[in-house]
């Protein structure tokens, strides 16, 4: 296992397995936290967009129609 600056540690199979399991759990935890953060950001964006639509007096259906037209033009 590399510990940095070109130094390596020798591990037994059991030690390496334990380290790998710990690392996997750590990465899974980090991925879950980032996923939750992304969902929160997405929810905030939707809230802001809805507020902007309300301020501009644009119906949500109009935006869907615009998006569909753009999608049709790109195909």
Image (cartoon, grey):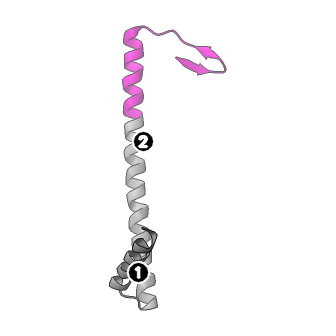
Residue 23 figure quarter? top left
Residue 13 figure quarter? top left
Q: Please tell me whether mark 1 or mark 2 is closer to you in this view.
A: 1
Q: SS class of the residue under badge 2?
A: helix
Q: Residues within 10 Å of mark 2 (few under 14, many from 20)?
A: few
Query: Is 6 contained in the magenta span?
Result: yes
Instruction: Please report the residue visible at 51 percent of the width from the left and 9 percent of the height from the top.
Output: 10
Q: SS class of the residue under badge 1?
A: helix
The answer for how far apart the CA atoms under marks 1 and 2 are is 37 Å
Residue 17: x percent and y percent?
37, 17
Residue 42: x percent and y percent?
41, 64
> Looking at the image, do the residues carrying marks 1 and 2 touch, with CB atoms under 8 Å apart?
no
For the record, the magenta segment spans 1-26
For the residue pair 62 and 5, the one nearer the viewer reads as 62
Q: Residues within 10 Å of mark 1 (few under 14, many from 20)?
A: few
- Toward the right, the furthest residue is 5
Look at mark 1 in the image and give the residue it sits on: 66
Residue 9 figure quarter? top right
- Is 7 located above or below residue 24 in the figure? above
Q: Give whichever of discs 1 and 2 has the lower sequence position.
A: 2
**Quarter holding the C terminus?**
bottom left
Q: Which mark is residue 12?
A: none
Look at mark 2 in the image and give the residue it sits on: 30
- Toward the bottom, the furthest residue is 57
């Amino acid at each position: 296992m590399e510990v940095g600056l070109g130094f390596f540690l020798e591990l037994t199979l059991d030690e390496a397995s334990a380290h790998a399991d710990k690392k996997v759990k750590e990465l899974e935890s980090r991925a879950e936290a980032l996923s939750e953060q992304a969902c929160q950001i997405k929810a905030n964006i939707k809230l802001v967009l809805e507020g902007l639509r309300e301020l501009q007096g644009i119906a949500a259906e109009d935006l869907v129609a615009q998006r569909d037209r753009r999608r049709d033009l790109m195909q």
